Amino acid sequence: MKKGIHPDYRPVVFQDGSCDFAILTRSTIKTQDTITWHDGNTYPLVKLEISSGSHPFFTGKQKLLDTAGRVEKFNKKYAKKK
């Protein structure tokens, strides 16, 4: 790799503000906020609005839609006339 052309790849904490979920991973994202992690070190912090900790698909609280009624309505509306 060429020196000086790549962004700084460092440990960063991503924290979901809507629930108690945070993950420490590596990223090149730039941020001004910091947080003290469980190991006692200070890391840059990225605040998220939604993550796998709060998304309905991953938490199992997803609502299922009644597609049968909608399909029947579509077929009734656009059915070929005999």
Image (tube, rainbow, N blue to C red):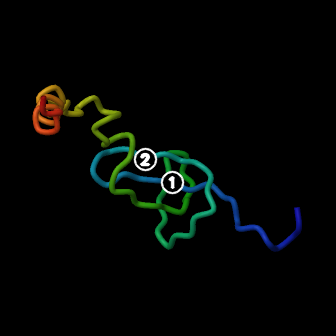
Query: Which quadrant would the N terminus be assigned to in this image?
Result: bottom right
Q: Is residue 35 above or below residue 82?
A: below
- Residue that appears at 47% across and 53% down: 14
The x, y position of residue 35, in whole percent, is 47, 60
Extreme residue in the top direction: 68
Q: For this rendering, which residue is in front, 36 or 57?
A: 57
- Residue that appears at 31% across and 42% down: 55
Q: For this rendering, which residue is in front, 38 or 22?
A: 22
Dot 1 falls on a residue whose secondary structure is strand
Residue 43 disc label: none
- Residue that appears at 16% across and 38% down: 78
- Mark 1 and 2 residues: CB-CB less than 8 Å, in contact? yes
Q: Quadrant of residue 52?
A: top left
Query: Which quadrant would the C terminus be assigned to in this image?
Result: top left
Residue 13 disc label: 1
Q: Of callouts 1 and 2, which one flags the residue occurring earlier in the amino acid sequence?
A: 1
Q: What residue type is labelled 1?
A: Val
- Number of numbered discs overlaid on the protein picture: 2
Query: Disc 2 marks which residue?
Result: 22
